[in-house]
Image (cartoon, helix red, strand yellow):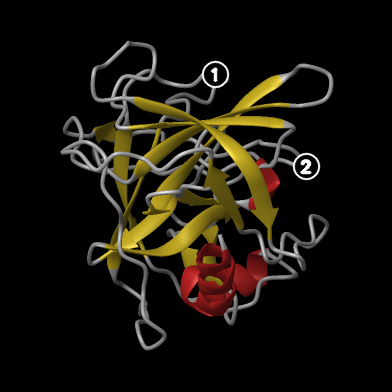
Amino acid sequence: MAPALILLAFLLSLGAQAEEIIGGREARPHSRPYMAFIESEDIDGNRSCCSGFLIRYNFVLTAAHCRGRSVTVTLGAHNITAQEQTQQIIRVTRAIPHPDYNPKEDSNDIMLLKLERRARRTRAVRLIKLPTHNVHVTTGDVCHVAGWGSKSFKSFSITDLLQEAELVIAKDEECKKCFRHYSNTTQICAGDPKKEQLAFKGDSGGPLVCDNRALGVVSYAKSKKISPVVFTKVAHFLPWINRNTNLS
């Protein structure tokens, strides 16, 4: 197989479960200053992680299935196991999953996290722009994803260093064949089912970045099977995002 960038997505059920980047490359440190590393703990004390992205200096956007009882966000990180001077670690005071989130159908898989305090704008911590209502992707467009997920099928541990990969927008028909509840109104399909382009454990909630805007939120794909990846379409949820961030 050619050394192309590979994104592998693995559908996991409830809780802060997520995707991974396999076959990608290490991102240039702090070249994606909007990235957020999210750690959560459930009622039994089990810890898990997701990705997210900074859309206001007091709000991170992520996937609704990344919810947890106690959530902490790390901004400005490249190596999440190091005590980097660029890092800002902030507790989440309120998680706002979309009210119509349906875990059985993986629909409306989007959530806002309100931070305990506003993040400081630095070289390593910046906002990413959201799309406008008239911004759309078309089949063949090349976008990017990033995260700290595992780099191997054989490993369930996250990687220390931020990884990134390219992903090509696929035909909606491909996702409709693979996923019964796929909707091109609220979701984006990306990845070639004929290639090893998926996602696994550690990156759910991260952004699909096209032309420097976050157009999608990593949601799900087939379990242990090559398939396109489904992203929640940010543009569809702009009224909900604006309403909830402006109220806080």
Q: Amino acid at mark 2?
A: Leu
Percent x, y of residue 184: 57, 79
172 left or right of 36 in image:
right
24, 212: nearer the viewer = 212
**Can you tell which quarter of the image residue 17 is in?**
top right
Q: Is residue 43 left or right of residue 240?
A: right
The one of 59 and 172 positioned closer to us in this rendering:
59
Give the residue displayed 34% in from the left and 33% down from the top.
23
Residue 30, image quadrant: top left
Of residues 147 and 47, the one nearer the viewer is 47
Residue beneath disc 1:
154
Query: Residue at 55% across / 79% down in the picture?
Result: 239
Quarter placement of the N terminus: top left
Count the marks: how many?
Answer: 2
Report whether residue 65 is seen: yes
* Residue 171 place in picture, x, y as percent: 47, 76
Q: Nearer the viewer, mark 1 or mark 2?
A: 2
The residue that appears at 53% across and 48% down in the rendered structure is: 205
Residue 193 visible, this angle? no
Residue 115, compared with residue 76, is above or below; it is: below
10 Å neighbourhood of mark 2: few (<14), some, or many (≥20)? some
Numbered badge on residue 14: 2
